Image (cartoon, rainbow, N blue to C red):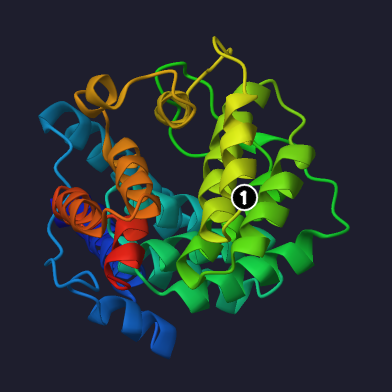
């Protein structure tokens, strides 16, 4: 009987040891000052406390299950670069930006030349209001990928179209441009949105047209190039073949005057309300703009970084 039980006992102890080791790997935290600063963020710059992301019961179950799979893969393959990419991004999908930054930082300790990990960490740093640090990472990703021919890969969670392939180059350019809205480098916004659009070789050209044009419009108007910005969006055709970027398309239709403000306001999401607030700002209605920026950042679990940038200057 003892002979029969011994393998079971040993097997149980080994499984327990493996489980403990895996848990230690998952709970490891980087002592990098950048990571410590990320965890120290508990509220937006305007003072709105961070809260958990409310995704609805079904979506939350799906995302948690997906994260659990990523954790299992990570614990079994902690020396694979992709383990850090996928696990960190899934924490990001859940709104856990500091945790995502931590995971990407640990990955970069092993893979210091990874443009992918720099791109992902830079994105999440910006979402966590660490703007300058995020841009440093994105610029480093740009350097590392400069002479690399990168094939399209699935980026994130597919939307309603179930389509999400992208390329690192176009996304690095796009996020450098978008993040430069936070630092007020509007010339870079325009330059890199053009680079992102030109680098796009996929079938979502119309999606990328409206997203890049949206930020170029904002940057142009911040530079005082109001007429040029208005003419640019007016030249964008109606009825584009949009796959996923419907929020950007709707915002562009509003900015070009195709959709009335009253009609747009009733259906605008966070991006749309940000667009309306920016128009108020350009038209010297700073009180209305501040009210809308405040509303949109309050409605998001970790604020809305584009609105927070403007609130810090009002």
The residue nearer to you, when weighing 131 against 259, is 259
Q: Is residue 49 left or right of residue 103?
A: left
Q: Circle 1 is placed at which residue position? A: 174
| Residue 251 against residue 12 in the figure, above or below | above
Residue 148: where, in percent of width, then height? 85, 54
* Mark 1 residue element: helix
Count neighbours of disc 1 (C-alpha within 10 A) and say few if under 14, some if 14 to 19, many if 20 or more: many
The residue nearer to you, when weighing 136 against 288, is 288
Image quadrant containing the C terminus = bottom left
The residue nearer to you, when weighing 306 against 56, is 306
| Residue 237 against residue 26 in the figure, above or below | above
Which image quarter: residue 188? Answer: bottom right
Q: Write the residue at 53% across / 22% down.
A: 163
Residue placed furthest toward the top: 239
Q: Is residue 20 left or right of residue 291?
A: right
Residue 174: where, in percent of width, then height? 62, 50
Q: Write the residue at 58% across / 13% down.
A: 240
Q: Write the residue at 27% across / 77% down.
A: 39
The residue nearer to you, when weighing 77 against 283, is 283
> Looking at the image, can residue 159 be seen?
yes
Residue 171: where, in percent of width, then height? 63, 47
> Looking at the image, can residue 204 be seen?
no
Q: Is residue 18 left or right of residue 245?
A: left
Q: Write the residue at 62% across / 57% down.
A: 189
| Residue 136 against residue 94 in the figure, above or below | below
Residue 201: where, in percent of width, then height? 77, 30
């Amino acid at each position: 009987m003892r002979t029969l039980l011994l393998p079971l006992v040993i097997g149980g102890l080994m499984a327990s040891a493996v489980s403990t080791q895996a848990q230690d790997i998952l709970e490891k935290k980087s002592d990098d000052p950048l990571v410590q600063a990320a965890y120290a963020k508990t509220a937006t710059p305007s003072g709105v406390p961070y809260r958990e992301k409310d995704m609805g019961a079904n979506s939350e179950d799906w995302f948690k299950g997906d994260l659990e799979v990523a954790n299992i893969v990570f614990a079994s393959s902690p020396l694979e670069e992709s383990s850090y990419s996928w696990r960190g991004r899934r924490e990001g999908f859940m709104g856990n930006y500091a945790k995502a930054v931590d995971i990407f930082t640990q990955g970069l300790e092993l893979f210091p030349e990874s443009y992918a990990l720099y791109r992902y960490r830079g994105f999440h740093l910006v979402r966590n209001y660490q703007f300058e640090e995020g841009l440093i990472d994105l610029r480093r990703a740009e350097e590392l990928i400069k002479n690399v021919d990168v094939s399209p890969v699935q980026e994130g969670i597919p939307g309603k179209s179930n389509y999400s392939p992208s390329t690192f180059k176009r996304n690095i350019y796009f996020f450098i441009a978008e993040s430069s809205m936070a630092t007020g480098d509007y010339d870079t916004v325009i330059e890199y949105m053009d680079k992102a659009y030109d680098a796009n070789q996929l079938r979502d050209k119309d999606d990328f047209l409206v997203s890049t044009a949206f930020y170029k419009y904002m940057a142009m108007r911040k530079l005082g190039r109001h007429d040029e910005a208005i003419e640019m969006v007016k030249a964008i055709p109606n009825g584009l073949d949009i796959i996923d970027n419907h929020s950007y398309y709707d915002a562009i239709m509003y900015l070009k005057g195709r959709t009335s403000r009253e009609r747009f306001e009733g259906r605008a999401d966070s991006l749309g309300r940000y667009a309306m607030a920016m128009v108020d700002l350009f038209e010297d209605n700073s009180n209305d703009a501040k009210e809308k920026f405040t509303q949109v950042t309050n409605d998001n679990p970790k604020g809305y970084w584009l609105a927070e940038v403007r609130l810090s200057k009002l």
